[in-house]
Amino acid sequence: MKHLIPEFERMKTRLPPGHDATLLVPCLRRIQEDRGFIDNSDIDGLVEYLGIPRIQIEEVLSFYGMLRRKPIGRWHLQVCRNVSCSMRGAERLIDELIGKLGVQPGETTADGRFTLSTVECLGSCGTAPVVMVNEAYHENLSAADLDALLERLD
């Protein structure tokens, strides 16, 4: 994290004095971009750098699903399981992924290729069910579409 401090300092120049704590989410996102996840050492560094209590950082990390505390696979499969997606087959897609990948939601395959997650909403209700692979949406997915998608991921 220390190598990111100059970046954080540049961000700080856009803030009024005394508002350093508002940098928490941008700093966490940047750390995650750099490392892939937020480690305990990163939290310790932010406690010192921003001068905020550790619990405040832990609360932010537990609230925002986009922030990760552990590494994920090369392909992060996030399946929406909100009402629209569930009514249109998301639960079947989740079951299919569990079977094909051999992991439960929240787990990563042993080879590090895939991490399976379920999320509350991906905001694509009109094209349900939807699976987000890394940053790309795959909508109106059937089981066959899901199989084809998995085959394309190297």
Image (cartoon, rainbow, N blue to C red):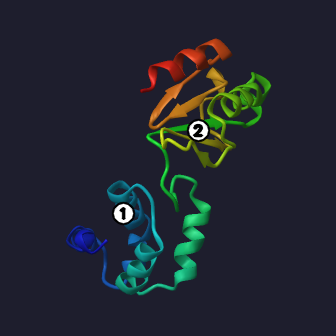
Left or right, 42 with reference to 83: left
Tell me the distance, in whole angstroms, between the alpha carbons under discs 2 and 1. Answer: 21 Å
Left or right, 135 with reference to 1: right
Q: How many numbered callouts?
A: 2
Disc assigned to residue 95: none
Residue positioned 41% across, 73% down in the render: 42
Residue positioned 31% across, 78% down in the render: 16
The residue beneath circle 1 is: 31
Q: Position of residue 151 (x, y in %)?
A: 50, 19
Res. 19 image quadrant:
bottom left
The disc labelled 2 sits on which kind of residue?
Gln
**Quadrant showing the C terminus:** top left
The residue beneath circle 2 is: 78
Which of the two discs, 2 and 1, labels the residue nearer the N terminus? Answer: 1
The disc labelled 1 sits on which kind of residue?
Ile
Residue positioned 72% across, 36% down in the render: 81
